[in-house]
């Protein structure tokens, strides 16, 4: 039941600042695909921000879809400068500008032309938003919280992919609950029965899993930063945002 080796090659496509920079000035299918993946990964925090600003579910989905269409078609990412900050900041500043200056005009112009389609699951998003609507945090602070939750979700999916690649998908489904549980609350004996191993082996597996998850989360977060020296500060900022309810 060992967790995947931390030195294993990444099983995901890098779609943060590195791809943004590499795709600037290009229009290849590869760069387009990478940027569309970027949008799929990070659209929910922007949708939630639009909803917190008073947009209806339909308008928030329409706004977010149109924002990403413009982001891709007009190559706004070409203006992104990794040396000037965080991907998180770039997205929220660009969305605010779009909401204030361009959304209505873009909506009026979109009929009749070919559009870049960015798949957004509005039903799932609205269910999630309704579940989290009790947050009293300001919209900007809630955006940071949603950004952190998105990074955690990406990290979990990446970790699951590592287990799947090792043929241990079933182990992951059993062990993943240990990532959010307090150590004292983990029933190692029960897990050992489920996995057909020893309690000692489960303790080692859980320790390695939690350690690997922290590593993956740090790697995911570092890819959204202009300078990895800012990693500790961003970790603290997002941890505080996650604590806001």
Image (cartoon, grey):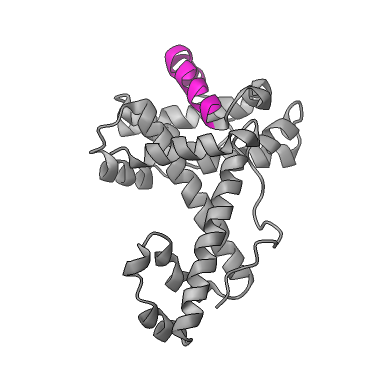
Residue 196 rendering spot, x and y as whole percentages: 46, 87
Q: Is residue 185 visible?
A: yes
Q: Is residue 52 above or below residue 208?
A: above
Place residue 15 in its image quadrant.
top right
Q: Is residue 59 visible?
A: no
The secondary structure that most of the magenta stretch takes on is: helix
On the rendered image, what quadrant is the C terminus found in? top left
On the rendered image, what quadrant is the N terminus found in? bottom right
* Residue beneath the point at 64% across and 30% down: 226
Place residue 183 in its image quadrant.
bottom left
Residue lying farthest to the top in this orientation: 101
Residue 92 rendering spot, x and y as whole percentages: 48, 25
Residue 129 rendering spot, x and y as whole percentages: 31, 41
Q: Which is nearer the eye, 118 or 113?
A: 118
Place residue 242 in its image quadrant.
top left
Magenta residues, as a range? Answer: 88-110
* Residue beneath the point at 67% across and 42% down: 33
């Amino acid at each position: 039941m060992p967790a995947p080796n931390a030195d294993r090659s990444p099983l995901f496509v890098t779609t943060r600042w590195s791809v943004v920079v590499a795709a600037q000035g290009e229009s290849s299918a590869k760069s387009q695909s990478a940027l569309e993946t970027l949008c799929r990964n990070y659209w929910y925090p922007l949708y939630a921000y639009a909803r917190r600003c008073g947009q209806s579910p339909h308008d928030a989905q329409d706004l977010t879809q149109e924002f990403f269409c413009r982001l891709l078609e007009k190559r706004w990412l070409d203006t992104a400068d990794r040396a000037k900050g965080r991907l998180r900041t770039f997205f929220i500043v660009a969305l605010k500008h779009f909401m204030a200056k361009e959304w209505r005009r873009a909506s009026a112009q979109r009929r009749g032309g070919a559009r870049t389609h960015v798949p957004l699951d509005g039903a799932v998003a609205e269910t999630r938003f309704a579940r989290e609507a009790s947050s009293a945090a300001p919209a900007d602070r809630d955006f940071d919280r949603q950004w952190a939750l998105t990074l955690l979700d990406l990290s979990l999916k990446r970790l699951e992919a590592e287990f799947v690649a090792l043929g241990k998908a079933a182990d992951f489904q059993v062990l993943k609950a240990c990532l959010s549980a307090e150590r004292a609350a983990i029933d190692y004996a029960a897990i050992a029965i489920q996995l057909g191993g020893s309690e000692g082996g489960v303790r080692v597996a859980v320790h390695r899993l939690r350690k690997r998850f922290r590593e993956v989360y740090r790697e995911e977060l570092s890819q959204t930063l202009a300078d990895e020296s800012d990693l500790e500060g961003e970790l603290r900022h997002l941890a505080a945002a996650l604590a806001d309810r």
